[in-house]
Image (spheres, helix red, strand yellow):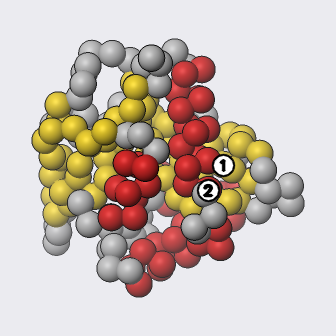
Amino acid sequence: MNLRLANLNDLSKLKVMYKEIIDNMNKNNIEIWDDIYPCEFFIDDIEKNHLYLLVEDNEVIVGAFTLCESNSGENYVKWDNKDEKALYIERFGINIDYLRKGIGSLLIKYAIERTKEKGCNYLRLFVVDINKPAINLYLKNGFNKVNGIYEERFDDFELIQYGFEIKVWS
């Protein structure tokens, strides 16, 4: 498997994979993504070189994540050292055919490597409170939950999100 930046030619396969992820999440009562999020953000992520793909030799997308320099919730929680340089994981997804095969941990390892390469001290993220599989994955991989919550309100629902971080440099 190979980690690489996504390009516009990947868009259709990426959207198919995320539609399957969304369907699987909905079946498991984790109804937090929809037709707009995350898929409508991929073009911008690709144009900014923020979207990474883990692909097999035959170009099957195994997983993906975006690394961003900021997050709309970053000032709502208490980071360990809020002024130190950090990147934020967003739109983290694993192809449903590859679940429970260690791909999540592998993607986190790659995200940590990219964070170090970009000279940042922390890798941070937000997880919706009902997404227990994601919370467990991040805790298993050394992330610490920080104090505070980020509440995001939409027309018909609200997301309560926890902040997590890992220091990538000792």
In the rendering, which numbered label is found on residue 111? Answer: none
Q: CA distance from mark 1 to mark 2?
A: 12 Å
In the rendering, which numbered label is found on residue 103? Answer: 2
Indicate the amino acid at tag 1: Leu
Q: Which residue is mark 1?
A: 53
**Left or right: 151, with 10 as reference point:** left
**Left or right: 155, with 93 as reference point:** left
- Identify the image quadrant of residue 74: top left
Coordinates of residue 75 in the picture (x, y in percent): 18, 31
Coordinates of residue 145 in the picture (x, y in percent): 26, 42
**Left or right: 25, with 48 as reference point:** left
Extreme bottom residue here? 27
| Whether residue 81 can be seen here | yes
At mark 2, the secondary structure is: helix
The mark nearer the N terminus, 1 or 2, is 1
Work out whether 131 lies above or below 47.
below
Coordinates of residue 87 in the picture (x, y in percent): 43, 29
- Identify the image quadrant of residue 97: bottom right
Coordinates of residue 29 in the picture (x, y in percent): 32, 79
**How many other residues sit within 10 Å of disc 1, few (<14), some (14-19) or many (≥20)?**
many
Work out whether 128 lies above or below 168.
below
